[in-house]
Amino acid sequence: MRQLTAEYLAKKINSCLLTITRVETSNDLKSAKIFISIFPEDKEKEILRFLKSEAGELQQFIGSKIKMKFLPRLEFEIDKAEKSRQKIEEILGAAAKSSDAPTKTSEVGAPPKAGLTRRSVKKNY
């Protein structure tokens, strides 16, 4: 369903970058929630309105491609988890650029300090 939705929307939307992050269906397959990510963010409301108006046509498109007892009622929702992930990445990226101090992750793979070799260091578990 995710692939068919992406195929359909690729033909209809070209004013922004729309990504279908996941699709969740109810146990009885009578409804499906399609989670999306939209860039730029200022187009979210406009695209959500468009998607809601296109839901019936998209449902027919899916129905023509897959044979199911019930065609699920489609709902669209902005994927808040994806937005949170992107914001965390932005914050971490900005923090890394502004910090001059080396981080622990930058020390991984560095040559051992004098007197210590990788073999001489014992791990206590």
Image: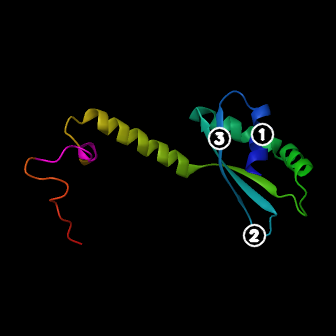
What span is in magenta?
A: 105-113
Image coordinates for residue 49, horizontal then vertical, percent? 73, 40
Q: Secondary structure at mark 1?
A: helix
Q: Secondary structure at mark 2?
A: loop
State left or right for residue 108 relative to residue 10: left
Determine whether label 2 and label 3 are within 8 Å by CB.
no
State left or right for residue 6 relative to residue 43: right
Image coordinates for residue 88, horizontal then vertical, percent? 42, 45
Marked residue nearer the N-terminal end (2 or 3): 3
Disc 3 residue type (three-letter): Thr
Q: Which mark is residue 27?
A: 2
Disc 2 residue type (three-letter): Asn
Q: Residue furthest top?
A: 15
Q: Is residue 40 above or below residue 28?
A: above
Q: Residues within 10 Å of mark 1 (few under 14, many from 20)?
A: few
**CA separation in Å, label 1 and label 2:** 25 Å
Q: Marks 1 and 2: which is nearer the front?
A: 1
Q: Secondary structure at mark 3?
A: strand
Residue 54 falls inside the magenta stretch:
no
Marked residue nearer the N-terminal end (3 or 1): 1
Seen from the viewer's position, the closer of residues 8 and 30 is 8
Quarter of the picture containing the C terminus is bottom left
Q: Residue furthest front?
A: 119
Determine whether label 1 and label 2 are within 8 Å by CB.
no
Disc 1 target residue: 7
Name the main secondary structure of what is drawn in magenta.
Answer: loop
Determine which quarter of the picture holds residue 20.
top right
| Residue drawn 74% across the image and 32% down it | 13
Q: Marks 3 and 1: which is nearer the front?
A: 1
Disc 3 target residue: 19
Marked residue nearer the N-terminal end (1 or 2): 1
